Amino acid sequence: MDEFINHFRIQNEENFALLNHDPKFSGDHKKSESENVLNDYKNQMDELQEKLYATNRYSLLIIFQAMDAAGKDSAIEHVMSGINPQGCQVFSFKQPNSEEYEHDFLWRHNKALPEKGRIGIHNRSHYENVLVCKVHPEYLKNEGFSYPFKSDEEDEKFWKSRYESIINFEKHLSANGTVILKFFLNVSKKEQKERFLERINDPLKNWKFSSGDVKERERWDDYMKVYEEAIRATSTENAPWYIIPADKKWFTRIAISKIIVETLKSLNLQLPELSEDEKGKLEESKNQLMKE
């Protein structure tokens, strides 16, 4: 993994803090060149996806987490626009329904995993259960848990258990051929405000805005705290977190694209090689078709 990617990769960092990651970072990249750079990564991704599908040995799970208005939807749209939709599945997870609440918190996410040879994108994910639910632990009542907890010790034990469940879940997936990339789009509070105002002022974007977004914004510090705790606890070698600067959308897309491309390249994917017998049959078929 090159220096650019390591700049964003978090692994076993006990002192990880979002304050150490600049949402405006763009390195040596220039916006004027971003479209060409992104198109190049798209072309590479298209070729690598075909090899991923043909090899049928691995699947790729891409997880997006972020505060509202950080650009998850647009990142998915622009980064993945060049790949074959037949080999890609996108799931956007909202509040669980009654059936999902009747199962463990990983159930609905397990159902949405990509098959071998495919790319799965989770817009929000099982991490909501240690993010939103940690800021609003009263939601745990929907899962059948007794809240409030009896003590701080019981509270700490509960969340530690959830982190362990997530780590074990991702370890199992990795051991069975699922390559996991977890992206946190790191938008600043100032930029979020500007994007909220844009949604309010533009009638074509009004549908994207909810008054609840401003209410959750009041809990910004609480969310930063639970994100730090979750990332610190669950960024592992087989399922690392990447903290992606999100104030400049053009750079966000480049960073995500490069990480996906380099990750696929690291798998050393090759198109299946035909046996001599199969090659002979191809030649026979060719000759037969040419005689028509």
Image: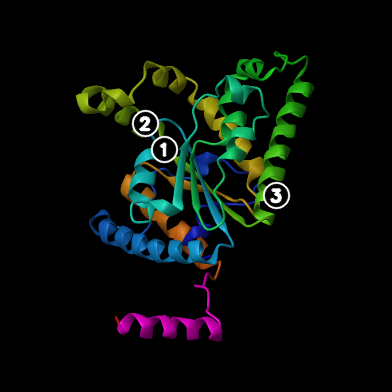
Q: Is residue 204 left or right of residue 100?
A: left
Q: Earlier in the sequence, mark 2 or mark 3?
A: 3
Amino acid carrying label 1: it is Val
Determine whether the residue tagged by mark 1 lies in a helix, strand or loop: loop
Q: Are marks 2 and 1 in contact (CB under 8 Å)?
A: yes
Label 2, label 3: how many angstroms apart (C-alpha)? 36 Å
Residue under label 3: 172
Residue 52 point in image, percent of width and height: 50, 63
Viewer-proximal residue among 98 and 281 = 281
Amino acid carrying label 3: it is His
Q: Dot 3, crowdedness within 10 Å: few (<14), some or many (≥20)? A: few
Q: Quadrant location of residue 282? A: bottom left
| First to last magenta residue range | 269-291
Q: Earlier in the sequence, mark 2 or mark 1?
A: 1
Based on the picture, tell me whether residue 290 belongs to the magenta stretch.
Answer: yes
- Total numbered circles: 3
Label 3, label 1: how many angstroms apart (C-alpha)? 31 Å
Residue 163 point in image, percent of width and height: 69, 37
Residue under label 2: 192
